[in-house]
Image (cartoon, rainbow, N blue to C red):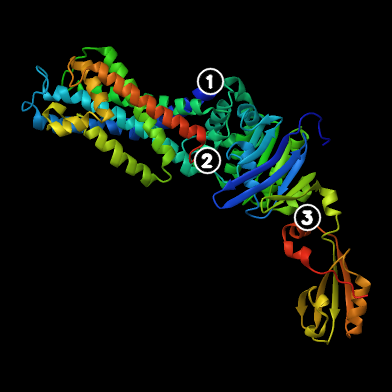
């Protein structure tokens, strides 16, 4: 094991997003707050999704998780594509890092960014609306697993994409629809039966539902099922990403 | 530098690399001894970079094996990469970091922590980067970026260093200072493998040279032996003649490399062509010999002869 190598790559990835914190940390927090203000004030008082939970409070965990997903994805994917396009990826490839160390460093850094942004969104949101935490373990577990899954998807997209527009396509046609159609703004119980069924095929739904369970103790799906779905999807995606790195997919000739 | 005993610095056996539609390396067998200053030459597309990339783990061989200090580049990739420092051909850099940061990060990738930072500082001093240690890489000149790339390759103190076109696009002063630096590395015991388009560079620096063409090794020899092969020795004859060029025998016409009015310049092969026979033949056709000049072959001649198949196909001249 090259633990120092792994830790260095992890620190480098954290340092990278830390250097542009206005873009990587502050901007997504402001965006999430705008969603909260616009949707919250338009729909507050009109919808009660869970008994005893106002819409604004219901919205907060969804927005937090959406920010976690999008930022964890953005961290690994943008770092990889930038190093591929600039050519600086070669310095990592020349180093004695195993495919697992390489993967773990990118995903762990993505988790850190996802959690920092998520925590930021939560802390600012609770200034506007109180949001209880019923099961902290579920909040932490789904936040970490969700960001790891999104970070892994970012690794896959970053390896696959050869140009920035391909990555933007992945973000706009895969990540954004999956996160918007996962129950961030609504409970899937309010959807027609077909779309309820379709939502159950969306792994992001389980992330948000399980995460929301941690706050309200209520969810559309039993948290154990959500945990299995998120954990299983993460393992599948991780196996695919590690396989891509091991084979040198689009990074080694 | 006298080669050091022990395993070869680089050992390549039966190496093939195939890309879709391209057979980039065709069974390369090559050994670079420890402590050698080795040159790898070849025209564009000959396979030099592919060979280097296989050694550095940036490309995977389709067949055959490659070892660095006896470590297989695939099976023992950690050891082989620790033994190797490579300066890539392209000027690439991470725009997020300063010089000091990228060097410390690169050392960290190799498992070297804070205890290695004094070496990073001394490396920056040796390469005159210390004044720019806290400058972002984006703000550096091309020459400074090139130095940073050399520092990145050396940051883990590798015994074997591969420099892929290290002086491409740098000015004369920097090129000379890089030569001195690389010579210093060699004196300190590093094995150096240099690819370059500047043949003069290889001729001045390298002890042994391999020439690669179309994915095959066409020569591997000591510099002096390569130059002494005679294959590229030239004999230049300046003659004036009123006789039209077309009336000269075909064998002579084929050797004319320049014509200025009545003045002809011939290029003869020192070993294959009979100079006396050529002079007699020219006199027989009314030519007046103005000047006879010989020119020793340089590496460029050898290189051109070995990488240009048509030269070998020319018939020998023997007018006797």
Chain of the residue where label 1 is placed in the rendered structure: A
Name the residue located 60 percent from the left edge and 36 percent from the top edge: B57
In the image, B244: left or right of A45?
right
Q: Nearer the viewer, residue A68 or A25?
A: A68
Q: Quadrant of residue B52?
A: top right
Q: Is residue B26 visible?
A: yes
Residue located beneath label 2 in the image:
B93
Residue identifier under label 3: B299
Instruction: Kindly indicate the quadrant of the structure image that contains residue B120.
Output: top right
Q: Quadrant of the C terminus of chain B?
A: bottom right
Label 3 lies in what chain? Answer: B
Name the secondary structure under disc 1.
helix
Whether A135 is drawn above or below A202: the answer is above
Q: Quadrant of residue A147?
A: top left
- Check disc 1 and report the residue beneath it: A3
Residue B215 rendering spot, x and y as whole percentages: 67, 50
* Mark 2 to mark 3 CA distance (whole Å): 33 Å
């Amino acid at each position: 094991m090259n633990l120092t190598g792994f830790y260095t790559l992890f620190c480098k990835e954290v340092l990278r997003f830390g250097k542009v914190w206005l873009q990587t940390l502050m901007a997504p927090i402001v965006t999430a707050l705008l969603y909260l203000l616009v949707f919250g004030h338009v729909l507050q008082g009109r919808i009660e999704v869970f008994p005893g939970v106002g819409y604004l409070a219901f919205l907060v965990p969804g927005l937090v998780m959406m920010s976690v997903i999008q930022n964890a994805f953005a961290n690994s994917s943008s770092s990889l594509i930038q190093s591929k396009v600039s050519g600086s990826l070669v310095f990592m490839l020349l180093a004695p890092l195993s495919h697992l160390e390489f993967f773990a460093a990118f995903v762990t850094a993505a988790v850190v960014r996802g959690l920092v942004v998520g925590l930021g969104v939560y802390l600012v949101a609770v200034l506007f609306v109180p949001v209880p935490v019923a099961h902290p373990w579920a909040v932490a577990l789904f936040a970490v697993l969700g960001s790891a899954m999104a970070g892994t998807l970012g690794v896959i997209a970053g390896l696959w994409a050869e140009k920035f527009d391909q990555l933007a396509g992945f973000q706009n046609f895969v990540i954004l629809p999956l996160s918007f159609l996962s129950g961030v703004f609504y409970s899937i119980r309010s959807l027609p039966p077909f779309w309820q069924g379709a939502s159950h095929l969306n792994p992001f739904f389980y992330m948000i539902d399980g995460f929301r369970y941690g706050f309200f103790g209520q969810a559309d799906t039993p948290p154990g099922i959500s945990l299995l779905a998120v954990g299983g999807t993460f393992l599948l995606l991780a196996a695919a990403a590690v396989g891509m790195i091991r084979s040198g997919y689009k990074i080694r000739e | 530098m006298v080669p050091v005993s022990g395993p070869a610095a680089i050992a390549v056996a039966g190496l093939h690399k195939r890309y879709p539609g391209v057979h980039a390396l065709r069974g390369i067998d090559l050994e670079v001894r420890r402590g050698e200053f080795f040159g790898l030459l070849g025209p564009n597309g000959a396979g030099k970079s592919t060979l280097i990339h296989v050694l550095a783990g940036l490309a995977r061989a389709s067949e055959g094996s490659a070892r660095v200090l006896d470590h297989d580049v695939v099976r023992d990739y950690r050891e082989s990469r620790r033994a190797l420092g490579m300066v890539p051909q392209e000027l690439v850099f991470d725009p997020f970091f300063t010089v000091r940061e990228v060097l410390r990060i690169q050392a960290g990738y190799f498992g070297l922590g804070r205890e290695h930072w004094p070496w990073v500082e001394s490396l920056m001093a040796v390469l005159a980067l210390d004044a720019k240690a806290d400058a972002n890489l984006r703000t550096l000149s091309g020459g400074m970026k090139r130095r940073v790339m050399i520092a990145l390759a050396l940051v883990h103190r590798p015994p074997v260093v591969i420099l892929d076109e290290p002086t491409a696009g740098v000015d004369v002063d920097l090129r000379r200072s890089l030569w001195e630096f690389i010579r210093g590395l060699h004196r300190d015991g590093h094995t150096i493998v240099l690819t370059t388009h500047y043949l003069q560079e290889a001729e001045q620096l390298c002890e042994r040279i391999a020439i690669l063409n179309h994915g095959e090794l066409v020569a591997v020899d000591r510099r002096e032996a390569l130059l002494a092969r005679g294959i590229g020795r030239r004999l230049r004859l300046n003659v004036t003649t009123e006789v039209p060029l077309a009336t000269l025998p075909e064998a002579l016409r084929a050797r004319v490399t320049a014509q200025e009015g009545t003045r002809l310049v011939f290029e003869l092969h020192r070993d294959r062509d009979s100079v006396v026979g050529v002079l007699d033949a020219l006199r027989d056709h009314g030519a007046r010999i103005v000047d006879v000049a010989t020119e020793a072959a340089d590496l460029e001649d050898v290189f051109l002869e070995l990488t240009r198949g048509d030269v070998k196909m020319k018939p020998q001249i023997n007018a006797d």
